[in-house]
Image: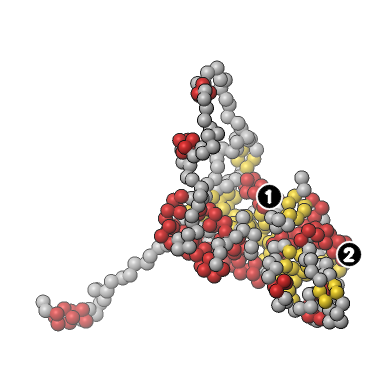
Amino acid sequence: MDRNDLLDLLNDDDLGLLDIEKKSVSVTPDDRLSESFMEINEFFLAHNNEPKSGGDIHEHKLASRLKHIRENKEQRDFLSKYDTHSLLKTDAKDLDTVSDIFADDDLDLLSLEDSSVFNIKNVPEIRQDRSNPDFVAQREICTDFDKYEYLFAQVQRDLKSGTKKLASFVESEMKEGDFFVLSGVLIYLEKIDDPYRGNSQKINRRTRCIYENGTESSVLLRSLGKRLSDAGYAIKGNSEMVAIEDGDSETGYIYVLKSLSENPRIATTKNLFKIGFSTTRVEERIRNAEQDPTYLMAPVSIVATYRCFNMNPQRFERLIHRFFSESCLDLEITDKDGRSYVPKEWFVAPITVIGNTIELIIKGEIVNYSYDKDTESIEKIR
């Protein structure tokens, strides 16, 4: 058959018998891992530095992801071909066996002149510690993550638009379908199993938790609650806030503002926000901000507002000033008449911390907490 006959045969295929159907390519766990690392590479290109913990939620999430990749030798080896900025280099040694531990003893702390310690005799039987967990949940790849990915995207959009907020975590309120933030990573509590008695003889429950980075775990509900109580947040919508009852008196608005000043000292100060209280609408209050030293003689943008009831404005301001006193902006502003003014309501703290602080004040629980300006976190007073 010559070339022309072959072309005639192909062109005469009315039933499409010779068409080759393209097979859909499924996304593998390796694909997700490489894509997640490429997002870190893109951050480095945009900012000329690796993501750090303590920034906004996106940067904090990337920093946490990079940390976990560095700690996983298999992931480091797989991603080495994508590591164009040497982000995966680590001085840590991989210690997989007891021999590795002894070989890594550079200071000779584990050497023993007398090896008799290894000759075990006359040792009574050691009973299992019933307080230990019967199972340590490990994260693994979530094979059906595509079913949940859109949920995480929606939560991120809701947080950005303000329809959802980071709130103080309350363990007793945990339920299926809730979202939480832990170490910068969004967690979806997809399922809570039936209660059972573990080794400690206490009632507990297994969960199925889906993580924004494409993994999942069956962590115990009590363990998850403890971690979130120590360093986590709940995500709540406006409809989940405390209901207004008859007899409640509206007293005004708590507001959080960000300065739009071009003053280099102000513009380069990260996480600088004004926290205040207004008895009028915030939009009216800030109308002439560029003429008011209280607002640093510059326009401002509204980051968040809280409608308040039964609140004493003076008491609120005292609590805020006391709580963030160590991180108050130290700057002298000159007004249009040449008079000096030292603003008292501008603080350096992440917006998530400010939101949680305001909620603790509203709930009357702020007296149990303090703010650590070095770690930029709220700590429970022991």
**Image location (x, y in percent) of residue 180:** 63, 57
Residue type for callout 2? Gln
Image quadrant holding the N terminus, namely bottom left
Q: Nearer the viewer, residue 300 or 25?
A: 300
Q: Dot 2: within a 10 Å radius of its alpha carbon, few (fewer than 14), some, or many (20 or more) residues?
A: few
Q: Which mark is residue 217?
A: none
Residue type for callout 1? Asp
Taking 185 as reference, is 2 above or below it? below
Q: Earlier in the sequence, mark 2 or mark 1?
A: 1
Q: Quadrant of residue 62?
A: bottom right
**Image location (x, y in percent) of residue 15:** 25, 77
Q: Which mark is residue 230?
A: 1
Q: Residue at x 48, y 50 (%)?
A: 72
Q: Nearer the viewer, residue 312 or 183?
A: 183
Q: Residue at x 43, y 57 (%)?
A: 80
Taking 298 as reference, is 36 above or below it? above
Q: Residue at x 46, y 41 (%)?
A: 96
- Which residue is under mark 2? 314
Separation of marks 2 and 1 at Cα, in angstroms: 30 Å
